[in-house]
Image (cartoon, grey):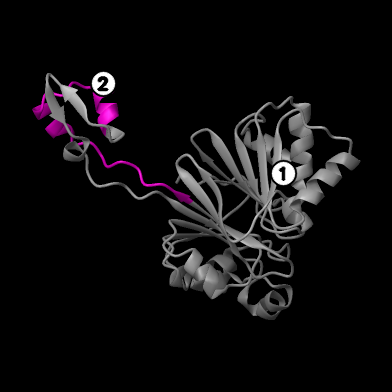
Amino acid sequence: MLFLGTSAAMPTPERGLACTCIERSGEVLMFDAGEGAQMALARARLGWNRPMRIFVTHMHGDHCVGVLGLVQTMSLQHRTEALEVYGPEGIVEFVTASLRALDVIPPFPLAITAVSPGTVVEARGYDVMACRARHRVEAYSYLLAEHESPGRLDTARLEALGVPRGPLWGRLQSGEDVDVGGQAVRAADVTGPPRRGLRIGVSGDTRPTPELEEFFAGCDWLVFESTFSHELRQKALDTMHTTAREAGELAARARAKNLVLTHFSARHGDVTGLLAEARAAHASVVAAHDGMEIGV
């Protein structure tokens, strides 16, 4: 998980606009693309021609304008891989009309889809779901849910059964029964219980809600906006954002294992106080910064 932009609506010299990436199996899943996302992607050296899906939480410029720069730069870099963009109602018109006005014709397949609550993407190894957030415009939070993976191989039992290392072990690991010297070896007999996949939630801009608490229940990692300190809670209420303390409280109620704070107002140059607020409610909290990478 790589944080390319961690500021709220106004960028600072240290923080760019909202952009969080998850790398898995050679693919990049990007959540929000604020202005300058292509520069942040270049600094991260994630490449211009990798499989990629972009999930926009809402149609505010600091979360979606970067899609245009990404498409233009990818076009200049002669991208050939398809690019998929998902977002609220209006995302299709915004991207297509803007690219037409800019005279950008992507040389790669570009699919743009308006989302609704529920499953957005069903892919090999994972799903991405959407839940309505509570912001000033139509907004969504997203959840990446990896599929279960086969249990670990019982190597001692495999050796006792005389199964040679190599392709047969791989077939058993994938759940396939094999034949060894006329003896059937069942995958279920030499593997442990299935392993639960990771669950990673990304809030976008929102007020805390019971629906999001349920949506993010049991997340391994929860990336949640923390625009303001709690002393500015009225400001958070007025602008439909979340304070760091509220983010920590929601993560605790949702039983999220780890919380990552992001989307900090430019007025909070030092986020130490925000981190302390969230940690008062949740034991495992980190504050994101541009370029921060978390191995998940």
How far from the left and from the top, in percent, is residue 90?
Answer: 77, 56
Residue under the image location 70 percent in, 27 percent down: 79
- How far is mark 2 from mark 1, CA to CA? 43 Å
The residue indicated by pointer 2 is 166
Q: Relative to 232, does residue 284 appear above or below in the rendering?
A: above
Q: Relative to 129, does residue 280 appear above or below in the rendering?
A: below
Is 292 magenta? The answer is no
Sooner in the amino-acid sequence: mark 2 or mark 1: 1
Residue under the image location 81 percent in, 50 percent down: 94
Which element type, helix, strand or loop, lies under badge 2?
loop
Residue range of the region highlighted in magenta in the rendering: 145-172
Using residue 180 as the reference point, say whether residue 49 is left or right of it: right
Q: Relative to 110, does residue 182 appear above or below in the rendering?
A: above
How far from the left and from the top, in percent, is residue 235?
Answer: 72, 77
Which element type, helix, strand or loop, lies under badge 1?
helix
Residue under the image location 79 percent in, 43 percent down: 68
Q: Nearer the viewer, residue 10 or 272?
A: 10
The residue indicated by pointer 1 is 37
| Residue 96 in which image quadrant | top right
